[in-house]
Image (cartoon, rainbow, N blue to C red):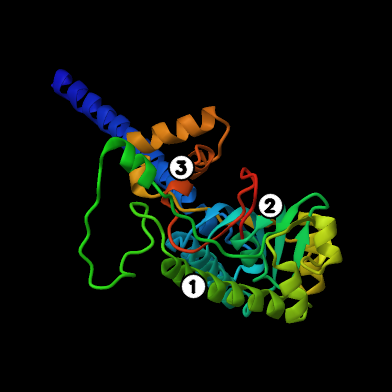
């Protein structure tokens, strides 16, 4: 009987220990899930209180569905009382700049929005900045390059050297032209130039509408030239010189509490990025001192390979700019 009683006592002790460790395991799992949710949804959970939302638009501009959705979520957030759009971009596709511009204009109808230019806001980058109701730039920022271009290679000389000839049967002479496999005709150049000039006129009208400039004044500035922040302020392409502090001061003048914290709304991590390739990409980006995998792609210059259609992009590596 005494042995049986001892067994019962031991079993009860074991059950109490097992229950204790089950509770501990549950708490650890709950904390891990909560921490993971805060990491994945940091822009919502970390910005639960009233704040000034910061949105970074950097690198080559494309029609980015995730970025457009992020702007929409900021617009719909009751906690975001004002918005700072931090721009550091040489431009990109004209259609991509247009899409972001239109979404920021919708945002500006709901909340005060200021653009803060970092190193560069050129071409489509400047288009995006002009969507804000106030633009602040550093004295040495690069601003401007208002214009549109289209680029395509001519590899006919290479084809002749390697003995390759391309045959094509088309419904009409301008179908799929220009293309890199045969010389461009005057008719094809005229077609592309008409497209470029139409988009260029739209870009100039946009600048004249958003800035305190007449259309003639905007047209004179839209020759592809770039300016320092100081020069851009003199030409009314930006409103003030400075950085985030000056951007916050403007928001304060619009009724936004100057003591609110600036919270960056970052790109959401997809579930795929938690897998080994995503981890490896982030590790490589970290070793190279680049914040994201997207930054790694931009640093390698790979984005430009995939640009298509009409471009509004500043390309300083060329000996002559064509905008």
Q: Circle 2 sits in a helix, a strand or a loop, which is it?
A: strand
Residue located 54% across and 67% down the image: 100
Q: How much space separates mark 3 and mark 2, taking CA atoms?
A: 19 Å
Which one is in front, 162 or 22? 162
Q: Earlier in the sequence, mark 2 or mark 1?
A: 2
Helix, strand or loop under label 1: helix
Q: Position of residue 20 (x, y in %)?
A: 35, 35
Q: Label 1: which residue?
A: 195
Locate the C terminus by quadrant.
Answer: bottom right
Q: Is residue 321 above or below residue 211?
A: above
* Percent of width and height locating residue 152: 44, 54
Query: Residue 146 appears at what percent x and percent y?
Result: 66, 64
* Left or right: 81 as drawn, with respect to 253: left
| Neighbourhood count class around disc 1 (C-alpha, 10 Å): few under 14, some 14–19, many 20 upward | some
Mark 3 or 2, nearer chain start: 2
Q: Residue at x 43, y 45 (%)?
A: 36
Q: Nearer the viewer, residue 49 or 11?
A: 49
For disc 3, the marked residue is 302
**Does dot 3 land on a helix, a strand or a loop?**
loop
- Displayed quadrant of residue 201: bottom right
- Residue on which the image places disc 2: 120
Q: Is residue 246 above or below residue 141?
A: below
Question: Can residue 73 be seen from the camera position used here?
Answer: no
Q: How many marks?
A: 3
Decide if residue 257 is on the left or right side of residue 175. Answer: right
Q: Position of residue 41 (x, y in %)?
A: 47, 54
Mark nearer the N terminus (1 vs 3): 1
Q: 10 Å neighbourhood of mark 2: few (<14), some, or many (≥20)? A: many
Question: Mark 1 or mark 3, which is nearer to you?
Answer: 1
CA distance separating discs 1 and 3? 26 Å
Asked if residue 164 shows in the view, the reply is yes
């Amino acid at each position: 009987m005494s042995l049986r009683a001892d067994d019962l006592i031991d079993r009860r002790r074991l059950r109490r220990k097992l229950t204790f460790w089950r509770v501990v395991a549950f708490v650890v799992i709950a904390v891990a899930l909560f921490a993971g949710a805060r990491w994945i949804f940091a822009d919502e959970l970390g910005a639960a209180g009233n704040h000034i939302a910061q949105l970074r638009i950097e690198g080559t501009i494309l029609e980015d569905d995730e970025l457009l959705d992020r702007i929409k979520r900021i617009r719909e957030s009751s906690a975001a009382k004002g918005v700072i759009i931090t721009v550091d971009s040489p431009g990109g596709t004209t259609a991509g700049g247009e899409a972001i511009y239109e979404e920021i204009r919708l945002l500006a109808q709901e909340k005060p929005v200021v653009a803060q230019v970092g190193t560069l806001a050129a071409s489509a980058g400047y288009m995006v900045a002009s969507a804000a109701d106030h633009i602040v730039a550093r004295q040495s920022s690069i601003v401007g390059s208002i214009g549109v271009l289209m680029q395509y290679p001519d590899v006919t000389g290479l084809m002749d050297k390697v003995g390759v000839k391309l045959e094509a049967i088309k419904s009409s002479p301008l179908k799929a032209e220009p293309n890199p496999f045969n010389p461009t005709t005057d008719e094809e150049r005229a077609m592309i130039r008409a497209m470029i000039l139409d988009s260029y006129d739209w870009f100039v009208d946009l600048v004249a509408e958003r800035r305190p400039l007449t259309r003639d004044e905007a047209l004179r500035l839209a020759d592809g030239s770039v300016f320092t922040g100081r020069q851009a302020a003199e030409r009314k392409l930006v409103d003030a010189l400075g950085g985030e502090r000056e951007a916050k001061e403007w928001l304060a003048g619009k009724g936004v509490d100057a003591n609110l914290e600036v919270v960056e709304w970052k790109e959401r991590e997809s579930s795929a990025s938690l897998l080994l390739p995503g981890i490896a990409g982030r590790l490589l980006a970290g070793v190279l001192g680049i914040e994201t995998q997207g930054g790694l792609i931009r640093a390698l210059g790979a984005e430009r390979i995939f640009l298509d259609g009409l471009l509004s992009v500043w390309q300083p590596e060329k000996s002559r700019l064509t905008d």
